[in-house]
Amino acid sequence: MQHALLHRSLPLRPLRPLALATSLLLCAVPLAAQEQAEPTAAEAANPAEPGTAQTPQTPQLPLALAAQLSPSSLAGDSARKQLLTALYTMLSEHPDVRKSRAALESAGHDVHTAQGERWPKFKVGTSQGNASIAQSQKRESYTAINAEVRMALFDGGAIDAGIRSAESTEAAQGSVLYTTRQNLLLDALTALLELHRFDTKARIAAESADTIGQLTRVEERRAELGAVGRNDLRQAASRRASALAQQHALQAQRSDAMARFVRFYNYAPGTALPDPQVPTHWLPASENAAQQASEQQSAELQEIAHTIAKAEAEVERAKAQRFPTLSAVVAHTRDPKGVLYTDGTRYGLELNWNFGNGFEMRDRILKALNELQAQQAQQEAVRRQVHEAASSSWGRWQAGREREAQLSDAVREARGAFEGYRRLLQVGRGSLSQVLDAQLDMQRLMLDEADALYDQRINTLRLVRTTGQLLPASLPAQWLDQLFANAATSAQYQPGRTPAAGSTEPTPLTAVQQLPLRLDPRLDPLLLALPAYQSTSQAVRW
């Protein structure tokens, strides 16, 4: 009888003898049933004749993958959830958003006030004084109470124009709120990418300093043996100090980026932060498509359109004020002494025509027309700005892809040159100065590549913000989760191996799941062929 461990998981912990014996005892329980269910080799070779009963065969048990969460994946998922919660909270509770929402609610109150002009108006007043009575030529004091209900029946359309003006103002404030949320989300994601940028660049500078330190120790040993002088050693020490100084400068910039991150997200992040990736279907297909989408989804154009509608309503209201107004009035006066008034209720219609001084209405109309012309001219300026933003965002995105690819190739070649000079130094055919120059070129290109990578991601965010895909007007549920869909399983950035746009790299198995050992019973054909082993249970190998 043979025993073999069949496994397909990595890494595997060695099984203790007690655990292996326990597994064999647990798996030996169903052997009696398998002995009756599984046919022998002779039975398998000679199938039963028609009419005879056949024992059903038990299907072979395959080795299944059991996914388990590692501590790193749990930490990444927790950081992603915390970041998404902070983003959604920021979009509703940030001070800028609250300020814009308060302006929107104020505009809503103006709409209610304008609509209330259609309803009757109530007025209660009192008057008190002395009056001379003509018959007796003596002065008597009086106290009168007046109550009045007035309702406008005809006003030339001024009330309707005021309602439209208030509604347009409210819609414009809604567009301002949408613009504020878009800009806030773009700034927050940019702050996150800037934090990643300086993290990466500081790590590159630290690795460069460590590499120079290793070269310095080797060169110092060679100098002690008298093989070389100390000029290259001094140059290496200078380069290492420069790399460390650059690392500290980048860490200072990272502190600024961290403070900006806390300002938007309202919490200090840990060591692991997800890296946003814009989905491919958010991006436009061409520059024309980007311009069309930006014009249709632009909150700035919507705001100026509502402002023009408000200016048109103000012009109509100014013109409507030239006509007379007709109102229904119900008034009641109470004078207990009857000095001035006789108690009673008055019903009637009042016609008022306010001419002013002859110039006031004309100037009001001309002012409203000038405001309308100014907003119409501003609309054309905003449309041109939107087209310019779409074209420039598309151009930067296209150029950024080429820059990222070229710098990736340059870093790859620079790394190859550095490794080549390093091997030549090890065999004594090169100098440390050549290796340091190659290392300096590689470090500079790696920093440029990191800038190109994160500049391209920021350009992508700006492009989708211009086309309205970053934050739709009616935000669907869990829309921002798509930005971090692959953040938990994304590999760490490594200079020189930037993936192309739209490509998906396989995630290492050990970073995502661990596969436990599972025993699978199988039949050994060699043992079955022996005449001494006629039982199926004796031919099982593990």
Image: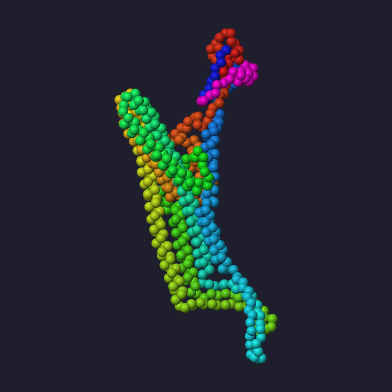
Q: Is residue 26 magenta?
A: yes
Q: Is residue 412 magenta?
A: no
Where does residue 229 sit, x and y in percent of width and height?
31, 28
- In the depicted structure, whether residue 56 falls above or below residue 211: above
Q: Position of residue 231 (x, y in %)?
A: 31, 31
Position of 491 relative to 116 (above/below)? above
**Direction from residue 537 to residue 182 in the image, left or right:** left
* Residue 24, quarter of picture: top right
**Quadrant location, the C terminus:** top right
**What predominant SS class does the magenta segment belong to?**
helix
Q: Which residues are magenta?
A: 10-36
Seen at 39% across and 39% down, the residue is: 245
In the displayed structure, 495 sits above or below 352; it is: above
Q: Locate residue 366, reporting x and y percent.
A: 43, 70
Observer-nearest of 261 and 10: 261
Residue toward you, 149 or 58: 149
